[in-house]
Image (spheres, helix red, strand yellow):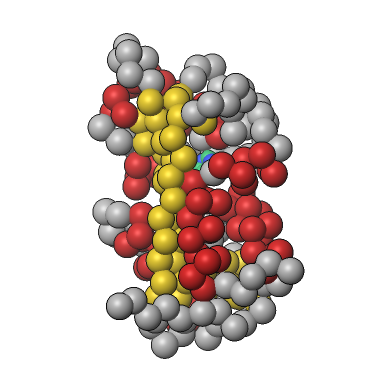
Amino acid sequence: MIFRRRLTDTRIVLASHNAGKVRENAALLAPHGIAIVSAKELGLPEPEETEDTFLGNATIKALAAARASGMVALADDSGFSVAALDGAPGVRTADWAETPAGRDYAMAMAKVEKLARHAPDRRAWFSCALVLAWPDGHTEGFLGEAHGAWIWPPRGGNGFGYDPMFVPDGMAETFGEMTAEAKHAISHRAAAFRLLAEACLPPPA
Ligand SMILES: O=c1nc[nH]c2c1ncn2[C@H]1C[C@H](O)[C@@H](COP(=O)(O)OP(=O)(O)OP(=O)(O)O)O1
Ligand SMILES: [Mg+2]
């Protein structure tokens, strides 16, 4: 028997310093009557992501933000996986984009292409773990995936991160070419969010 805890708060912390993730999660939460303040806006520190799973790292981020703020916190740990690279960059997706001058996703996408270009298997997928944490240490976690293929060169200026090099199964456009609404209909984040909403959120208005 799984005892779920449902969310009663109407304002929570979004435990992320990534503007793209904050934007997408805010849009997913809004129909449920839930507003967000980001960890960045609150000046919360970024905890080290020391786990080797998406759910593990999302739990670290959600608990750190909930304990520091005294509010319920939602964390999103996500990543891009390439079949020919045995699932890399995966949990380390953000690290692949790290440079001394800051995040560089064009460089990170080029690194993926350089390593995978000679492999015939072009399958790729995004994963997203969403964890809701309460200040008392209770957590609820959910995992979503979106499967497709990587393409080169990247296409589109919408979305964020590795979106321009990913075409979801059955679609012609990359996540970077789609509208936010189209991405939300099929994304890894939306898949995790549907499970979260079903288990923990008030129904959409
Ligand atoms: O829908 C997506 N479309 C494209 N790229 C994406 C997506 N979702 C995650 N990603 C990439 C961005 C980042 O390089 C990594 C997540 O890393 P991850 O540690 O979870 O996030 P982050 O460090 O950017 O922000 P934070 O930890 O403060 O939430 O995967
Ligand atoms: Mg991170």
| Left or right: 98 in relation to 202 | left
From this viewpoint, is residue 41 visible?
Answer: no
**Residue 29 lies in what quarter of the image?**
bottom right
Question: Where the N terminus falls, by quadrant?
Answer: bottom left
Please provide percent x and percent y for residue 172.
Answer: 60, 22
Please provide percent x and percent y for residue 129.
Answer: 42, 56
Please provide percent x and percent y for residue 198.
Answer: 52, 66
The residue lying toward the viewer, choosing from 180 and 194, is: 194
Q: Residue at x 51, y 79 (%)?
A: 6
| Whether residue 189 is situated above or below residue 64 in the rendered picture | above
Q: Residue at x 38, y 20 (%)?
A: 122
Q: Residue at x 37, y 80 (%)?
A: 3
**Residue 143 lies in what quarter of the image?**
bottom left
The residue lying toward the viewer, choosing from 121 and 59, is: 121
Q: Residue at x 37, y 36 (%)?
A: 81
Question: Where the C terminus falls, by quadrant?
Answer: bottom right
